[in-house]
Amino acid sequence: MAFIIRLLVIALVIYLFYRLIRFIFDPKRKLDAAIEASSYYFYDDVSNVRKNFFITLRGVLFEGEKYLGTTEESFEVVSIFVWVENPDQLQGFSREDFLFLEKEIHMNYPDAQIDWQNPIEKLMKKES
């Protein structure tokens, strides 16, 4: 009986250690930490087109929806629609900030056309 209890305790310790490691390296936790720290973080599953990506910059969370289409050689993400949940947080953002975000998105999706939701779209078109 003591042997079984020891085995269960060892298994529990291994399981808890595994869960701790998964928690530390969880990308969603890193995204939340970047929002709190008002820093830049890009969270995306590039291999899954159906999953939206998230970008945080200066404490503002942007969400992007990917659309699959055809290029001359293959099927790729050809269109991306980006929006912010709370536009009130955009105070202080400039066109250069959004150009930086576009550059970062194009690193993963070079063939994609990026469309912004209002009011960002107005800013991007006004100064072009």
Image (cartoon, rainbow, N blue to C red):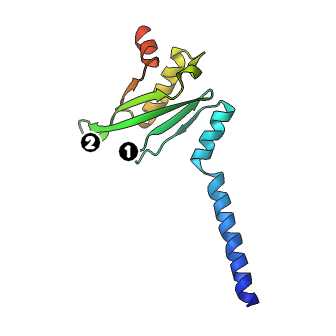
Give the mark nearer the N terminus: 1 vs 2: 1
Relative placement, left or right, of 114 versus 63 is left
Residues 35 and 69: in front is: 35
Residue 107's x, y, as percent? 45, 34
Provide residue 54's location: percent of width, then percent of height: 51, 37
Q: Please determine whether, in this image, residue 4 is positioned above or below residue 32.
A: below
* Residue 32 x %, y %: 62, 40
Tag of residue 79: none
Q: Looking at the image, which residue is at 44% across and 34% down? A: 64
Under mark 1, the amino acid is Arg
| Dot 1 crowding, Cα within 10 Å, few <14, some 14–19, many 20+ | few
- Residue at image x 68%, y 65%? 16
| Figure quadrant of residue 9 | bottom right
Residue corresponding to mark 1: 50
x then y, percent, for residue 27 = 58, 47
Left or right: where 19 falls relative to 116: right
Name the amino acid, label 2: Ser
Q: Name the side, left or right, on which 22 lies relative to 3.
A: left
Residue 128 higher or lower than 110, as above or below:
above
Mark nearest the camera among 1 and 2 is 1
Q: Which numbered circle lies on residue 74?
A: 2
Assess disc 2: are there few (<14), some (14-19) or many (≥20) residues with their C-alpha within 10 Å of its C-alpha: few
